[in-house]
Image (cartoon, coloured by chain):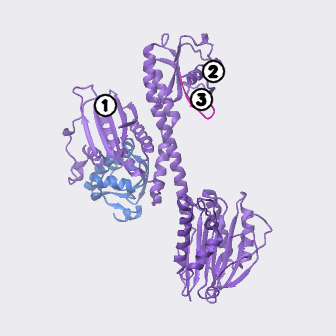
Chain colours: A blue, B purple
Amino acid sequence: MQIIESTQNDITIFTLEGRIDTEGAVNMDLTLQDAVDAGKHKMVLDMAGVRYISSAGLRTLADVLTKNRDAGGDLKLVSLNSKVMRVFSIIGFDNFFSIYDSVQDAVDDF
Amino acid sequence: MISLGELRVEATIPNLRTVSYFLYGIGHRLQLSEKTLFELELAVEEAAANIVEHAYPPGRLGDLLVQAEAMDDIVRITLTDWGEPFNPESVAPFDRNAPIEARMKGGMGLHFISSLSDSVMRKAAPQTGGPNTLILTKHVEPRAGGAHEPDLARELDAMLSVSEMAGSTLDLDALLRRIIDELIETIGAERGTLFLVDPEHDELFSRVLLEDPGVLREIRLKMGEGIAGHVAATGETINIENAYEDTRFVRDFDDITGFQSQSMLTMPMRNPQQEIIGVVQLINKEGGRFTARDERLLNAMAAQAVISIENARLYAQEIQQRLVNQELETARSIQKSFLPQNIPQHSGWEIAASWHPMREVAGDFYDFYPLPDGRIAVLIADVSGKGVPAALFMSLTVTVLRFAMSLNLAPAALLDQANRVIIANQQSAMFATVFVGYLDLATGVMEFASAGHNPPFLHRAGAGGCETLEAAGVAIGLFKNARFACKTTTLTPGDVLVFYTDGITDAIDPDDEEFGEERLGEIIRAHAAYPAQKIADLIVKEVAHFVEDQGTFDDETLVVIKRQR
């Protein structure tokens, strides 16, 4: 699980690469929670490189989404592949997250 | 139910990936579709993660056993742990309509398990320490035979994901190292070696040495040579107190490494078909000689190790196969991008094309190119060879030909130019046959040249017969001084011109008879009144009918041009 962080104005963009299984979720959770603690509440997650996600990763996403929205920010997701999208729809996450086709679309929507 | 194997690991987070890879092996064996395997993987990972997180108290590690069985279209995965029995009632059920904050705790994993499996059954041990089992069953759909996913992005995605897995701890060497470490520690030996049988060379080899001294990286033994070779050849277990007193012992390795072997327990490793796939050898039992209990323990552990090894091998094969498939799929999409996106539309003319690569990638192509002087160039070509190399060579050829056409060179000069450039740019001995015609849509006059390509058929509406368009020239990419002749013909209203590659005429029926030019000419004659697309479809259908169920063995490409009456 690799995470690359970049910024565009006050928006933090995380590019994820790899499997967000139980092990991968630990890494993602550390990075995103650090960002939340640092007050970066406008986040875009580019998930084009994510091939797998299980509940551990989804828990982190739900938690970070809640914290960001409470602080007036958001967690916007970009480029979910069909398998990840299926996982989202099984638990109804697709209704909670704003999902975009490109990072720029997500950034522009803030 | 038929057992497909089992995996017993310590219930730790890193081992969840080992569980996933075990499932990949199962998926390979059952030929599961990617979707099914994904669902199975997710359900099992969630169940295994629950065991890792909740079964054993902090600081106490325990085991996780995963067993896979199948019958007909049902696969059954049983997960067993020996920790605290899990009570699903203790977790609030997952509510799809709850606010998102409420979904973070528990419940979600169980929801995945139940929604991705067809049935979930739990059996809790009556008291802590007994086995708790969770049985998942799932109807599976096998991968459709030979069918290809149309979605390239998804395929590439799969490729990345399998290569990523391959790069992690799942490779065979790491697995073998882990196994031998475990055996050494459990049985209490100083050193151990795990040999695998290399059936191709009739040898045993090992890349595993504890405390690798740097001198020995791979040991190879002939079958029957040394104690390990003897065990591999006979299937006997050998338990000796002093290796130096055994005549079969080869002391070379001790001499090289300075290690002093004494007691030694050597045992064959058999797969479920009872074939010997390797030999495990433990050296220098702590405090003396290996006991009968050690033998039994090693025997049991080796049986488990075999399943892991076989799965790792299957998994490696699966990755290899997937990578090859992805490569072909990628090459095909690149290649397809070279074909014209649109067939030119001109009043008074019908133009149709058909492209059927035999493999995922072809050596055939066709092209339509609007020339600076208003005519259109029609081109068909067949590159030697098939598969990826042919496709790459085809790409070079297309690029060169298109560039030459943009220079407004006459057909023969075009082929001459392309021939020179291709010879200068490639070292391999590949070549292409090309037929190119410059058609004036106002007058029907076509200037053409051929580089050793099958002469197209021209059916004359007036005379009712077929002629072939011949022009002297040899395939490009072969001879620096090749010469090409330029010819001219005129298409009158009702005429039908058929360009084709030899995949059409060389197709053979079950009696080894060729489809041949005569048969092709006959179809064109009989159907010249049909629209161009219909003629192309008919030819493809006739060829498919001709070869019957043995399939075609070459790319088939057709371009049909008809001047309307």
Front: mark 3 or 2: 3
CA gap between label 1 and label 2 equals 42 Å
Using the rendered view, name the quadrant where residue B20 is placed. top left
Residue B253 numbered mark, or none: 2
Q: What residue type is labelled 3?
A: Phe
Q: Which residue in the structure is indicated by mark 3?
A: B205
Q: Is mark 3 on a helix, strand or loop?
A: strand
Q: Which amino acid does label 1 sit on?
A: Asp
Q: What residue type is labelled 2?
A: Phe
Residue lying at the far front in this picture: please name it.
Answer: B511
Q: Where is residue B44 in the image (x, y as percent from the top left)?
A: 34, 41
CA gap between label 3 and label 1 equals 35 Å
Q: What element carries label 2?
A: helix
Viewer-side residue, B472 vs B465: B465
Q: What count of labels does the image hold?
A: 3
Q: Which residue in the structure is indicated by mark 1?
A: B81
| Residue at 40% across, 38% down | B19
